[in-house]
Amino acid sequence: MNRFVRQLLPFGTLTLIIAALSALEPDTFLTAENFSNVLSRSSYSGIIAMGMTAVIISGGIDLSVGSMMALCGMVGAWAMLQAGGPAPGPGVMFLGTLVGVAVGLACGLLNGSLITLLNLPPFIVTLGTMSAFRGLSYVMNKGMMFDVPTYKFLGQGALLGLPVSVLLFGGIALLAFFLLRYTPLGRYTYAIGSNRQAAYHAGVNVKRNLIAIYALTGLFVGLAAMIATSRTVSAQPTAGISLELDIIAAVVIGGASLSGGRGTITGTIIGTLLINFLRNGLTLLGISTHLQFVVIGAIIIGAVALDQAARAKAQTA
């Protein structure tokens, strides 16, 4: 499979899924309300996927993003309620949002530091922090949610006729595109993922750059968490359960290699939309959430199999 076909495949698949669902459920799928709902959900998962793209390109993985999202939302909502009571005002909500984003940054720094300073595998570290972050989310309010009825702008508001969450997704996507393509951090990310030892001997500070990548991912998770909290005007300790599956699927479907060294922001955007339109369509068709996990899992296996086949062909060519 040549590079052009590999890059075009996610977009072609997305187009086919939209066309098929439009034919199967024209009355419910082909509506402005449904498309707005899909784009809104894609916004927070897509923001997280921007960070996951950099992590996977670097040759790593972050399994903690779903649990981290729950923790960020819970701490941010708790801060709002502590400072502003049951109906916090705009200033308090802004500060609470910053708190939630800061928690994400701290979690990302923790992941990156454990991976690099202790020389531990990303899979093991983030598997452990996935459990730890989820546990802390439950401890925050004894397993109960925090209701923040006035916190609506990020998740439900609109600017210039477009949802704020979608605008934020677009802004983060542009930022991530710029960082990966035009900055030393982006170049080093690809270099580390392609060959860590070669990058190190070329003078790249591998540890510092990996910490920055995981910290940036945590920052994005924090913002996504506050958008998700605003969508439902509540922070829930169960938020983001299994979200890492969708995020990884979106990045891999978009053309990133789990072996590292390859991936694009454009591909991840398409992968994010594909996963969210697929989940939406399966729900409209009455397919249970449990079976949807089977479908997403099969997609991940298929995408990785295609990547491995392409690599094997390139090596023998």
Image: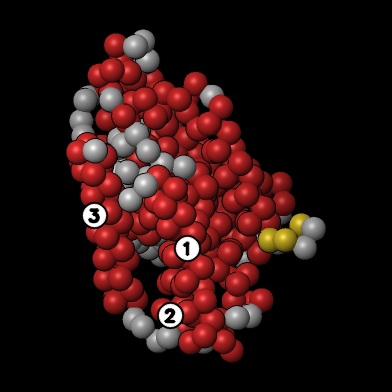
Residue at 60% across / 81% down in the picture? 30
Where in the figure is residue 121, as x and y percent of width and height?
21, 34
Determine crowd level at label 1: few under 14, some 14-19, many 20+ residues with C-alpha closer than 10 A.
Answer: few
Above or below: residue 135 compared with residue 25 = above
Q: Circle 3 is placed at which residue position?
A: 305
Reading the chain from its start, which is encountered first: label 2 or label 3? 2
Identify the image quadrant of the C terminus.
Answer: top left
Residue 283 is labelled as: 2
- Circles 2 and 1, Cβ within 8 Å, touching? The answer is no
For the residue labelled by badge 2, is the local secondary structure a helix, a strand or a loop? helix
Residue at 36% across / 10% down in the picture? 203
Residue at 35% across / 40% down in the picture? 56
Q: Nearer the viewer, mark 2 or mark 1?
A: 1
Q: Which residue type does callout 3 highlight?
A: Ala
Above or below: residue 39 compared with residue 63 = below
Q: Circle 1 is placed at which residue position?
A: 12
Reading the chain from its start, which is encountered first: label 1 or label 3? 1
Total labels: the figure holds 3
Determine crowd level at label 2: few under 14, some 14-19, many 20+ residues with C-alpha closer than 10 A.
Answer: few
Res. 41 in view: yes
Where in the figure is residue 231, as x and y percent of width and height?
58, 64
The Cα–Cα distance between marks 2 and 3, rounded to whole angstroms, is 27 Å
Res. 247 in view: no
User: Horizontally, is 173 left or right of 300 in the view?
Assistant: right
Q: Which residue type does callout 1 highlight?
A: Gly
Where in the figure is residue 85, as x and y percent of width and height?
62, 56
Depth check: 295 or 98 in front? 295
Residue at 63% across / 80% down in the picture? 31
Q: Nearer the viewer, mark 2 or mark 3?
A: 3
Q: Which residue type does callout 2 highlight?
A: Thr
For the residue labelled by badge 1, is the local secondary structure a helix, a strand or a loop? helix
Residue 231 is labelled as: none
